[in-house]
Image (tube, rainbow, N blue to C red):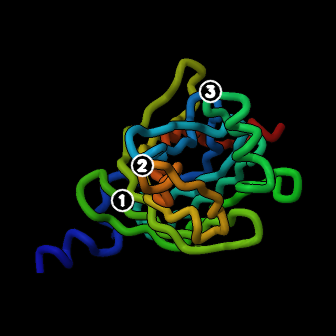
Amino acid sequence: MLKNHREATLSSIYPYETLTGIYSIDPAHSSIGFSVRHAMITNVRGAFTDFEGVLKLDGSRPDRSEAYVSVQTGSLDTGVRARDEHVVGPDFLDAGLFPLMTFRSTRIVRTDDDQLRMSGDLRIKDIELPIVIDLEFGGAGRDAYGKKRVGFEGTATLQRSDWGLSWNTGLETGGVLISDKVKLILGISAVQFDRADAA
């Protein structure tokens, strides 16, 4: 019974009614990155530097909230140019043919205070599959320009081969060069859109 209560769809008792509104993700203060095991001994991290997104938040009924994000696949940065060129090339993301990957939410539930679980569809190349992102609400407030902001941290674990990103090579010591498991790491800061912005 307690578990069902904690995982129940968010309802009107959720204490963030003032967050209701439409927000645009601020790429200057947000990050969309990942971590993947390399050579079975360490993790390689990278991030996409060109992305945009919209959050439609319903503070009294967050289960009605929505999120949409699009990422330029060619904007990958792992700190090594040759590696970036390989990953955005035909063996992996094939940014020349598929310049965008997208995520659209389908469901949001509350799992604990300030903890959310967001389900949605992630499209990479020509494959769209469901994923689940665990989110933590980071807070809300007004920035130096008087704009209302909200923040979230999120993680998800994917099998890259599900999206056809299956390139690999074996190691002399056994195993493979790159793990199939990829951890997505999100840091989102979004600014509320108001009518004055459209003027």
The foreground one among 136 and 8 is 136
Using the rendered view, name the quadrant where residue 41 is placed: top left
Point out residue 27 in the picture as x, y percentages from the top left corner.
Answer: 64, 34
Q: Which SS class for mark 1?
A: strand
> Which quadrant of the figure contains the C terminus?
top right
Residue at (75, 37) in percent of width and height: 197
Q: Residue 116 shows which numbered tag?
A: 1
Q: Amino acid at mark 1?
A: Leu
Residue at (88, 51) in percent of width and height: 96
Residue at (62, 63) in percent of width and height: 166
Q: Which residue is mark 3?
A: 79
Pointer 2 and pointer 3: residues touching (CB < 8 Å)? no
Q: CA distance from mark 1 to mark 2?
A: 41 Å
Q: Which SS class for mark 2?
A: loop
Q: Residue furthest top?
A: 144
Q: Residue 164 shows which numbered tag?
A: none
Q: Earlier in the sequence, mark 2 or mark 3?
A: 3
Using the rendered view, name the quadrant where residue 93 is placed: bottom right
Q: Which residue is mark 2?
A: 173
Q: Which SS class for mark 3?
A: loop
Q: Amino acid at mark 2?
A: Thr
- The correct choice, above or below, for 75 with respect to 98 in the image is above
Q: Earlier in the sequence, mark 1 or mark 2?
A: 1
What is the crowding at mark 3: few (fewer than 14 residues within 10 Å), some, or many (at least 20)?
A: few
Residue at (68, 37) in percent of width and height: 83
Q: Amino acid at mark 3?
A: Gly
Q: Residue furthest bottom?
A: 1
Q: Earlier in the sequence, mark 3 or mark 1?
A: 3
User: In the rendered view, does 112 fall on the left or right side of 130?
Assistant: left
The foreground one among 120 and 167 is 167
Point out residue 124 in the picture as x, y percentages from the top left corner.
Answer: 69, 63
